[in-house]
Amino acid sequence: MKIQTFDPSYYDALVKPVEGEVITEAKVRDITLPSGKVIALITLDNNHDYKRPNTLGPNTLVGLGTTLEILRTRAKAKEIDAVAITGKRFSFAAGADLSLVNQIASPREGRLLAELGHNSLGMLGDMGVPSFAFINGLALGGGLEIGLNSNYRTIDASCPAIALPEAYLGLVPGWGGASILPNLIGIENALKVIIENPLKMNRTLKAAQALELGIVDRLIEPINFLEDSLKFADAVLTGKEKVSRPNQPGKLERVAKWDIAIKIARKSVESKLGTVPVAPFRALDILALAKHNDLAQGFEAENDALGELITGDQFIASMYAFDLVQKRAKRPAGAPDKSLARPVSKVGIVGAGLMATQFATLFVRRLQVPVVMTDLDQERVDRGVAGVHAELDNLAAKGRLDSDTHNRLKGLVSGTTDRSEFADCDWVIEAVFEEVKVKQDVFIDLEKIVAEDAILATNTSSLSVDEIASVLQRPERFVGFHFFNPVAVMPLIEVVNATKTNEATVATAMAVAKNLKKTVVITRDRPGFVVNRVLAKVLGESMHAVDTGTPIEVVDSALAPMGLPMTPFELLELVGLKVGVHVLESHHAPFPERFFESANLDKLADAGAKLIERNGKGEKTGYTKEFKQIVGTDGNSPMTAEQFRDRVETGLAEEIHIMLEEQVVAGVEDIDLCLILGAGFPLYSGGITPYLDRVGASEKTFGGTFHTPQIRGVGAQQ
């Protein structure tokens, strides 16, 4: 694609108002290769240490474009034979400077930023001489697009992450990625990188995976990365190295596979996210257009999409949510001094069922200390230990544990029916039946066994931590430590700071969670803590609606605009009907005026009923006869979808407002963080509270809003 002469003045409206940009300079030096050919090497460097990666703000892009225009002139004059671009130590480029996007005031400025990216980076593919990207570190978003606009690419084998995460943030790859990548690695591989990975909580690629897909041409060990990359460039320039790209699409793929792959991907996104999120579908439109391999047309589509999305409500909300996940999650509000945390050298787990097995696997893998499990009889214990060993075997088979670590971790897991073996445990957590008396009996017994400074933790999801602790001699070393299922996948732990829990106990819980690679939100001991209190409202209202005559289909689809990762009845079936009954009862008891219980849910649970009909592929095809028969026998007050959604939205606004008044958490940001990490609320919604502000539920309920207009956006889609 021919790039016009780069004119920095064209971007004055975008560049001059920018404040606070950390500029990444494009430093150039000529290198004479062994063949005698001269390569101009650009090094991107923001003149900060390695903790601050290179980023691409407007001034940076103008500077890079100006540099490339000079090099293009030199190439035309035959002063250089090639151009290469790399990054400072450990950092190639982490993409656009997202800290500046709130300064983009209009879609026109957003489009101008897209044009700036295309016109600066695009020159790498129109230098008049070959261009090379030596990817020596993190390459995300615009950073990867630098490489994609280049003719050839090498990558450091130790590169920690390579990705196009834009769909995760409510954008599209807007500087060439969505148009170039599918024509480099094929449509199915491109869909994985641009759609599938971002929507799986922003999954990234390792260097070897980037090579396998064909994103890069050579994988080079870090010790001589730059030297060997230059050797590769010299071999290409002299014709000694022929680069083959087997994943590049041919005519058959374009004719027979391309449209089908896009159609399947579109259906998959709709089934998982509904049709409310805009960005994934705009990205799919551009990927569909890329079939024709017309970069000018593709870049124009990227300009239009980025211009619209970057000032849209969903991106504004996603940046708020992204900031929570990246910053607030790393500095939990209300956390005590880290130095108070006690060391944990042995873990005890009471129970050997499914949840306990998940605990044991996570604790032994992350803490790498002895883990002992106990249960009522040896058969259950043996089954639990075997389950942990099987999961470790599975991790080893996938290459996620080396042979030595695999064998060592298996040796650290043991089981017993004798709780006296917990005597030297520093941390003991239970995974027993969700009943206060059962848990109290467990901890009364444990208190007689463990050391005085050992921490006792409960994984209760809804019971009062204070009530469980009321029978203990030393309640100050007792803490709530609420995991979410599946334990290995869900990133959140609610640490419940009960009335008598001391700071050393909370600090230890925080340290354990960090070592487990989990995110913590500290809550007070209130029913349901955060996530289950919100979900109890949704599930209770949903059962009440069908109990009083609203059709199942209406209830189960009405909340789609909220962006829940699954419908209410899919969620209910996932958590289990008996658990659902317990959750509703545990909220109805303290708050009978705000939370419903459901006799029909009791009947469904007692019958062991299934709710959802599915085909052989696991796709939902409808609702079971049993479900319809049990909930369809009463009720004469049906609601429309709009009435039901309004009822849920205003109910949630009321409940969250009360939770903040009760100081369940330090701030509204913690509620959104919990719902994003613990319940799968999408980033594009910003979490639950910006959504409630946008749809007017907050104003309707308590006459105010949770956030300023800048965070919640205006006029978002329903």
Image (cartoon, rainbow, N blue to C red):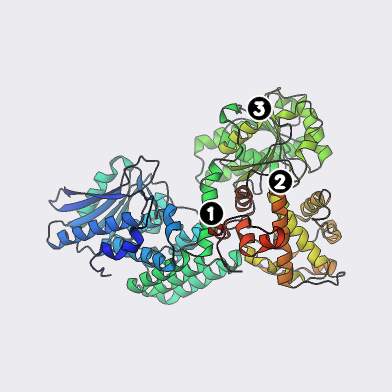
Residue appearing at x 33%, y 71% in the figure:
295
Foreground label between 2 and 1: 1
Badge 2 amino acid:
Phe
Badge 3 amino acid:
Asp
Rendered image quadrant of residue 130: bottom left
* Left or right of 41 in this view: 589: right
Badge 1 amino acid:
Tyr
Are there few (<14), some (14-19), or many (20+) residues within 10 Å of tag 3? many
The residue that label 2 is drawn on is: 529
CB of mark 2 within 8 Å of CB of mark 1?
Answer: no
Horizontal and vertical percent position of residue 638: 80, 72
Horizontal and vertical percent position of residue 146: 33, 57
Residue appearing at x 33%, y 43% in the figure:
221
Examine the rendered structure and indicate whether residue 46 appears above or below residue 548: above
Identify the image quadrant of the C terminus. Answer: bottom right
Examine the rendered structure and indicate whether residue 518 appears above or below residue 258: above
| Earlier-in-chain disc, 3 versus 2 | 3
The residue that label 1 is drawn on is: 320
The residue that label 3 is drawn on is: 426
Residue appearing at x 50%, y 58% in the figure:
169
Rendered image quadrant of residue 224: top left
| Earlier-in-chain disc, 3 versus 1 | 1
Helix, strand or loop for disc 2:
loop
Helix, strand or loop for disc 1:
helix
Examine the rendered structure and indicate whether residue 225 appears above or below residue 313: above
Along the line of sight, which residue is nearer the eye, 296 or 235? Answer: 296
Along the line of sight, which residue is nearer the eye, 501 or 292? Answer: 501
